Amino acid sequence: MRKFDFKLQRVRDIRAAQERIKQNELALERKKELELLLKIDRLRNDQSEEYRRGQVFLTQSLADIRMFVSHQRYMEALERTIARTCANLDSQRQAVEAARLNLIEATRKRKLLDKLREKRLGAFKKEEEVAVQKIIDEIGGTKSARLSAAGLESGMDVGHSAAKIHGSDRRP
């Protein structure tokens, strides 16, 4: 029996490698997205803490205007940083979506070759089954022919023996 050989196996292997690369790219993009989400969360926590500290400044009897202005500038800087990080998060989400679509395309290409391989393997198996059946039929036909030939010879022998028993086989 011959071995199944898929001529596009190298192409399939390349597609599988490309798919793994796309998976890694998507994972990196998602990691960046998570880092941005954590950064936004940290900034919002800092903003809340700073707001509470600002409330303490306002409740003191001797409020220092420089501290208040410094606090206000810091709060505005936090707001700008949060806004910038949110914008970065939006662009990062677009990058994640693009990486996801690239992965889907790479997976589709690999699966296409997998389906083609399965079809060719199925056709190969059918061809092998037909070849094996043909060999079995040939062996069976040869054996049957031998048995028939042996049966005819033994049938003649049996007939010959029967004639001898009855005395009909007389030789001059």
Image (cartoon, rainbow, N blue to C red):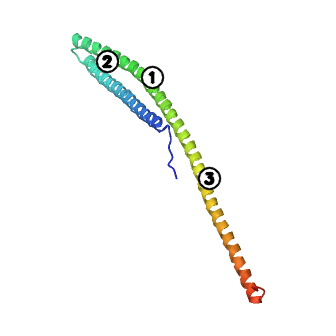
Judge depth for marks 3 and 1 and give the one in front. Answer: 3
Q: Earlier in the sequence, mark 1 or mark 2?
A: 2
Q: Earlier in the sequence, mark 3 or mark 1?
A: 1
Amino acid carrying label 2: it is Leu
Task: Judge whether 83 appears above or below 22 on screen.
Answer: above
The residue that mark 3 highlights is 130
Amino acid carrying label 3: it is Val
The residue sitting at 30% across, 15% down in the picture is 77
The residue that mark 2 highlights is 78
- State the image coordinates of residue 85 (x, y, percent, origin top left): 36, 20
Frontmost residue, 91 versus 24: 24
Measured in 3D between alpha carbons, the distance from the residue under mark 3 to the one under mark 1, in whole angstroms, is 54 Å
- State the image coordinates of residue 58 (x, y, percent, origin top left): 27, 17
The residue that mark 1 highlights is 94
- State the image coordinates of residue 149 (x, y, percent, origin top left): 68, 70
Secondary element type, mark 1: helix
Position of residue 30 in the picture relative to residue 104 (left or right):
left
